[in-house]
Image (tube, helix red, strand yellow):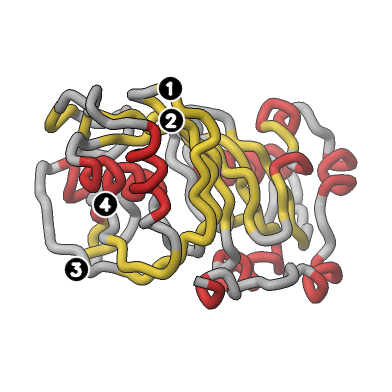
Amino acid sequence: MARAPLHHIDGILLVDKAPDWTSHDVVSCVRRRFNLSKTGHCGTLDPLATGLLVLLLGKGTKHQERLMSEDKVYAGTLRLGIETDSQDRTGKVTATADPSAVTEEQLRSAASRFLGEQLQTPPMVSALKKDGRPLYALARQGKVVEREPRRVCISRFDLTRIALPEADFLVHCSKGTYIRTLCADLGQALGCGAHMSELRRLSSGVFHVENAASVEAVKNWTLDDLLQHVIPLEHLPSLKSPGEHDACRRH
């Protein structure tokens, strides 16, 4: 049987990633579904996370570095009193503490201290590489290696609901910020530990999850449906949002 012809489609596709899917799963699903010549994405979302995944099709992959450098906005939930080796709820519990003494005022005050430009140490469970090997691969072997802190900027860290020991949050941050690490560092600052229990990416640069299609919808699309949702590359020159990259300069 002859292979179906490759489709050479250039542009950007916004997908709302479902839980338990990896970012690679989404890319592979779209590429296989429509037999695309080239597909990539702008910024990995962990399996437990949901929300905006910016896919790059064809010549769109040439813009990956530029689009990955955009600020991101996330909503999520953290839980005080429990630390895990992955800094989220999927990891092995490494420490527990009673967070009952922490007040709402103390939590808000501690969160405010993480605003602005700062150094953040990437977690072991990340795709960063050490001597050519991803950190997550070393973590699976039970290894912990030294990681170089990286400069990040958090321009917004709002606690939108507090029901101790849990709190919902909204974070606007620069490229390379690990929200799980932000939650864990906040727990350390409060002296009781914490981990991230839920995460959803709301936006990346000028792209918003409200304009994204669900994975289930994409799986049922025809090629014409795909073409109707692809953002043409001609729109890229106007994608820079006002005040982009100025957040840290304001702190």
- Relative to 51, does residue 70 appear above or below in the rendering? below
C-alpha gap between disc 1 and disc 2 = 6 Å
Relative side of 94 to 19, left or right: left
User: What residue appears at the point 66 percent right and 32 percent down from the top-left corner?
Assistant: 215
Which element type, helix, strand or loop, lies under badge 4? Answer: loop
**Element marked by disc 1:** strand
Q: Tag 3's secondary structure?
A: loop
Which numbered disc covers residue 131? Answer: 3
Of label 4 and label 1, which has the lower sequence position? 4
Q: Which label was assigned to residue 26?
A: none
| Label 1 packing within 10 angstroms: few (<14), some (14-19), many (20+) | few
Q: Earlier in the sequence, mark 4 or mark 2?
A: 4
Tell me if residue 244 comes above or below residue 79 in the rendering. below
- What residue does disc 1 label? 163
Task: Classify residue 152 by image quadrant.
Answer: bottom left
Q: Along the horizontal axis of the image, is 138 left or right of 237?
A: left
Q: Position of residue 234 (x, y in %)?
A: 85, 71
At label 3, the amino acid type is Asp
Query: What is the three-letter code of the residue carrying label 2?
Result: Ala
In what quadrant of the picture does the N terminus appear? top right
Work out how far the residue at label 4 is from the one at label 1, CA to CA, in angstroms. Answer: 26 Å
Q: Label 2's element?
A: strand
**Hey, what amino acid is under mark 1?**
Ala
